[in-house]
Amino acid sequence: MSEDLKKGLEGVLVAESSLSVIDGDAGKLVYRGYTIEDLATGASYEEVLYLLWYGHLPNASELEEFESEMASEREVDDDVLTTVRAMAESDENPMAALRTAVSMLSAYDPAPEDADPTDEAVNLATGRRITAKVPTLVAAFTRIRDGEDPIEPREDLGHAANFLYMLNGEEPDDVAADVFDQALVLHADHGLNASTFSAMVTASTLSDLHSSVTAAIGTLKGPLHGGANQDVMEMLKEVDDAERDPLEWVKNALDGGRRVSGFGHRVYDVKDPRAKILGERSKELGEAAGSVKWYEMSTTIEEYMQEEKGLAPNVDFYSASTYYQMGIPIDIFTPIFAMSRVGGWVAHVIEYIEDNRLIRPRARYTGPSPEETEFVPIEER
Ligand SMILES: CC(=O)SCCNC(=O)CCNC(=O)[C@H](O)C(C)(C)COP(=O)(O)OP(=O)(O)OC[C@H]1O[C@@H](n2cnc3c(N)ncnc32)[C@H](O)[C@@H]1OP(=O)(O)O
Ligand SMILES: O=C([O-])CC(=O)C(=O)O
């Protein structure tokens, strides 16, 4: 075995996957053969879930049946809502609350306790239930935290529109529902990103799907991964509130050795194709509201980061101002990412464990050898 050390597993191939592929030089993303641009403009989040989970785009009747199955699974048990309330009232971090709530869902899930963890039909049904319930958990947490009562899901709305309805208490207009649905499509899958890999590591021990998704949520939470969308908006707000020059803020951050959230990527060397689409949405939302200040601030920073650091924006950079202009609270930007990516986590787990092998890399040992140490019993230390 080669002793080459690949810190952060950069470039290491660990699995085969037919789910999504990234061309990091050209800035292209494809789900099962379909470009992200075609899917973002032509397919709903439910269609993309179907594509990822069942291997092909649904026809009209397949989609209708799938949408109604998903919609019928949205409600969560009262015990789970009680725990969500306790976490919201004690101001728990929204991603931590989501991680706990998803873990708790398993206690109320109808899948048999002794189900074979590699049973695809069981995993598809469980994955569908988890994916259907995540928006209900996020909306309930946010409303309770903001001093409002949670709103029950509706079955007659699509996945995106129903979430906005549960969040705001009123049906979204078509523009809001479309922009949000598109954001869900764009975030659904992205190769072996850290949270997906985390889900796969858990699944590879033949653990259960709730455990995999719980592990993935914990991984997505970090600021180097999904947590960056919240950090981007906090940066833009800080600059705006203090009426500072955005470039002065960015230079200061870089001079202080800090990273600018929303820039850089392990796989893309050029602008993330999702950032291109979300940038357009951010601009359109600004134009509709009569001010493109968030978009302009973002493009100013983008140009500077590209010229000075050679770093291009990733998906989190423009999702931030898109969500903000839709009135979504900043600290649920990352739970919204999870709401979409759960589809990808489920798909990768099912794909990987079909031909499972325990994921277990090695570390190069740099500690002392037994010749360099002498064991001393505790009473003599
Ligand atoms: C959905 C997603 O997960 S997209 C990514 C979201 N995360 C962020 O936006 C956080 C900011 N970005 C980053 O921290 C990184 O670009 C990552 C974590 C996304 C990718 O990291 P890696 O591929 O491991 O690159 P690595 O961390 O080795 O960085 C390479 C160099 O670029 C620099 N760099 C990378 N990103 C940034 C950034 N956003 N701001 C400033 N410098 C950066 C690093 O400091 C490093 O410089 P050095 O070689 O002089 O030390
Ligand atoms: O692929 C990655 O490393 C991070 C990312 O953009 C994503 O998960 O969407």
Image: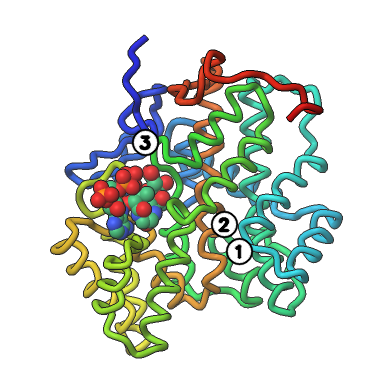
Count of numbered badges drawn on the protein: 3
Q: Where is residue 113? Give x, y as percent.
A: 81, 28
What residue sits 74% from the left and 72% below the top? 144
For the residues bearing labels 2 and 1, Cβ distance under 8 angstroms = yes
Foreground mark, 2 or 3, reads 3
Q: Amino acid at mark 1?
A: Asn
**Image quarter of residue 79:** bottom right
* Residue picked out by circle 2: 159
Q: Which mark is residue 20?
A: 3
- Quadrant (top left, top right, bottom left, bottom right) of the C terminus: top right
Please give left or right for residue 340 compared with residue 280 in the image. right
Task: Give the distance between the C-alpha atoms of the residues marked 3 and 1, in whole angstroms.
Answer: 27 Å
Q: Within 8 Å of ligand 2, the CB of disc 2?
A: no
Q: Amino acid at mark 3?
A: Ser
Secondary structure state at the residue bearing disc 2: helix
Please give left or right for residue 24 compared with residue 200 in the image. left
Q: Where is residue 108? Give x, y as percent.
A: 82, 43
- The mark that comes first in sequence, 3 or 1, is 3
* Residue picked out by circle 1: 162
What residue sits 60% from the left and 43% below the top? 65
What residue sits 56% from the left and 68% below the top? 331
Q: Where is residue 360? Give x, y as percent.
A: 52, 21
Please give left or right for residue 379 compared with residue 304 in the image. right
